[in-house]
Amino acid sequence: MEFNTIKINSTFTSPFESSPRADDENSPFRKPLSLWPGMYHSPVTAALWETRTKIFERLLDPPKDAPPQSELLTKTPTQSRTTILYNFSTDYILREQYRDPWNEVRIGKLLEDLDALAGTISVKHCSDEDSMTRPLLLVTASVDKMVLKKTISVDGDLKMAGSVIWVGRSSIEVQLEVTQLSTDSTVITETVALTANFIFVARDSKTGKAAPVNRLEPQTETEKVLYKEADERNVLRKLKKGEKKNIENGEENRVDSLLAEGRIFCDMPALANRDAILLKNTRLENSLMCQPQQRNIHGRIFGGFLMHRAFELAFSTAYTFAGLMPYFLEVDHVDFLRPVDVGDFLRFKSCVLYTEFEHAEQPLINVEVVAHVTRPELRSSEVSNTFYFTFTVRPEAKANNDKFRIRKVVPATEEEARRILERMDAESSLLK
């Protein structure tokens, strides 16, 4: 059976059609409860969970005391390649599930779907197709920078495709592309709207220790180039982890310069620059209890859900800061520092970290969202993820407001000043 292309259908029935019968064996809605990791699903995650259960049913009910995989296989990128299709042009209910107020795709749901697809691809690569061995535990370790290259409309069909492009001993890199399909008379054109790379690490599901993964053998020239580029990125990541940040000669001067304006706000607020605002005054926060319905097949909260919630808070933060509807541009590299479990108390804290005015027509708003796993009974709080989103304002909204301006954000503490500089330096290094 071919599972490389998955057509996505709406998960709600039409009010103009009869509801599917629960006792109909052919109904796609009739599934054993044991096959559903959680009941919180977008149409894509629902389709992907079902696909995983058809291909790897043993993942949900592995044999007791099953041995680990004894022999590593060598696979090609094509073997893990998976495509999902959003039929927005014909499925109006699916279109409504993804539509935002501007008739574009909701970015938060898209981030969630990207994580779900990347997870399915990594599972396909790591499977040894032996029902007598225990499956690996695959965890999202990080997500590389994602840039929205063009607006994604819900009026045209959408395709999301990806495959494993690199493997280490126990890590896997998956590259995904989101493509907008448009029809001009009889010609179908495809435009890449977004590219994302996910890093997964494999753990033994019994011991929790790092576990080796199947090898990868690129076949085409393109696959070989992608493998080489991913290998270079992996070397760079290891170097960065081993580096200790050295304080440059001008570092303290930069910190003092940033703090100078913030001190005026703190000590002489009546004389402060009205075109600036303290970082702490841009903050928003929300909290939630992690529910069983949000879990993955390993019983933990899946990364796409976290990215979705972080994006929604970042969007709200940019909106209340700018006073005009924001427009998403990119999300920077994300590290998943610790897993989030069912029952955890999760707090998302956001702020506008800094703004940029290099291009007057497109001022940038850089928003930081930090996810904390909080345990009141233990009086502890640990950072699970830190997300960095970049927004601008919608051109049509800006054009209708002659008095619009973006404020400069200034720190009130040394810690805030260093966070701002760290992000500025990280952004500038990516552009080199």
Image (cartoon, grey):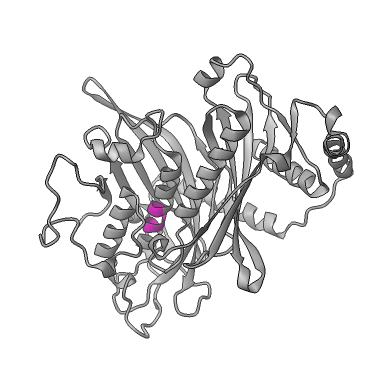
Q: Is residue 338 left or right of residue 406?
A: left
Q: Residue at x 31, y 29 (%)?
A: 155
Q: Nearer the viewer, residue 247 or 280?
A: 280
In the image, 30 versus 188, the foreground residue is 30
Q: Which residues are magenta?
A: 116-121
Q: Is residue 173 visible?
A: no
Residue 198 image offset from top left, x and y in percent: 49, 52
Residue 158 lies in magenta, yes or no? no
Q: Position of residue 46 (x, y in %)?
A: 30, 54
Q: In the image as oriented, which residue stretches furthest toward the front?
A: 270
**Main secondary structure along the magenta-highlighted residues:** helix
Residue 293 visible in the current orientation: yes
Residue 3 percent coordinates (x, y) = 25, 54
The quadrant the N terminus occupies is bottom left
- Count the numbered circles shown: 0
**Rendering coords of residue 127 (x, y %):** 35, 67
The C terminus: image quadrant:
top right
Quadrant of the rendered image containing residue 213:
bottom left
Q: Is residue 228 above or below residue 352?
A: below
Asked if 38 appears above or below 44 in the picture, the reply is below
Residue at image position (46%, 62%) is 301
Q: In the image, what residue occupies the spot 42% across and 69% down?
A: 299
Nearest the camera: 320 or 218? Answer: 320
> Which residue corresponds to the image point at 29% horizontal and 34% vertical from the top-left?
157
Residue at the farthest bottom position: 65
Nearer to the camera, 224 or 275? 275
